[in-house]
Amino acid sequence: MKDVVFSVVLPVYNQEDHITSVISEYSQALDRLNFPYEIILVTNGCRDNSVKLCFELEKKIPQIRHIESPQQGWGSAVRLGLSVARGNILCYTNLARTTPDVLVLLLLYSQTFPDAVIKANRKIRDNWVRRLGSLLYNLQCRALFDLSYWDINGTPKVFSRKFCGWQELQENSDLIDLEFNIVCRRTNQPVLEIPIFSHGRHGGKSTTSWRSARRLYLGALRLWWQLRLPS
C-alpha cells in the first residue's frame, strides 16, 4: 500500500445491523477522494456478530484493518485505533451517526486547514431530552475548562499526526472526547468546528442513558479536580 494519507478509526460495539452497509458506503466515498486511506475497525466487548462481520469486511476490502480491543469502552477503542494508525491525517468518529458525506467533508477540511483540528458540531439531537442533556454537559465543560467548543462529543474529529496531543489521551470511557478538547485548549491548538445537521442513527441502539449521562457529568468534575491538583 502507498503511504497512507487518511486513517479513519471506527470503534465498533454491537453494530451488526448496519456495519456492513455503512462501511461499504464509507469505502466507496473514500475511494472517490483518490487519496490512499485505511479504515481501522476496533471491536470492543461486542456481544453480537460484529466481530465476525468486521473480519469479513477486512477480507473483502483491502483498505480495512480490524483489531479487537482487550477492554470495552469508547475511549480505549479510540486510543488503540490511533496507536496503530499509519496515516498522516488521523480521524475517529461514531460510525452509527456519521454519514459518508460528513466523513469526506471533514477530511477535505483537514486538507485546507492542515494545522487545525477539525471537528463536527452536531445541530440536531434525537429528542428534546437528549438535546437538553447535551446542552447541560457542554455548558458544564465550557465553564469548568474554559472551552469555546459547543459540541464536546461531536465527531468526526480529524487532525494531523503532527498534533502530538492525541498521544497524551488516557481516558478509556466516553470522557476521551472531553479530554481531547482539554488537551487542545491547553496546547493552544486551533480547532475548527463544522456545523453538521444530524439525522439520527444508521441503526442499532444508543448506549446513552441517564446513567451514562450521570457518569459524564461526574467524570467532567473528576477531570476538573485532577487538573487542579499539583503534579
Image: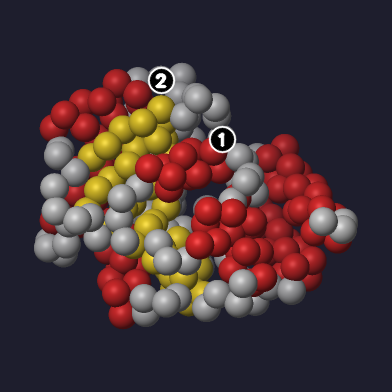
Asked which quadrant contains residue 63, the reply is top left
Give the answer, above or below, for where 219 lies relative to 46.
Answer: below
* 3D distance between C-alphas at marks 1 and 2: 16 Å
Report helix, strand or loop for mark 1. loop
Give the answer, above or below, for where 185 lies relative to 102.
Answer: below
Write the residue at 52% across / 57% down: 166
Which numbered marker is on residue 133?
Answer: none
Which numbered marker is on residue 73?
Answer: 1
Give the answer, above or below, for where 230 lies relative to 207.
Answer: below
Name the amino acid, label 2: Asp
Judged by depth in the image, the label closer to the viewer, 1 or 2, is: 1
Give the answer, above or below, for where 51 lies relative to 135.
Answer: above
Crowd rating for badge 2 (residues with CA inside 10 Å; few <14, some 14–19, many 20+): few
Which numbered marker is on residue 48?
Answer: 2
Query: Where does residue 176 sit, x and y in percent of width and height?
Result: 60, 50
Report helix, strand or loop for mark 2. loop
Farthest residue to the front: give it. Answer: 231
Write the residue at 68% across / 40% down: 212
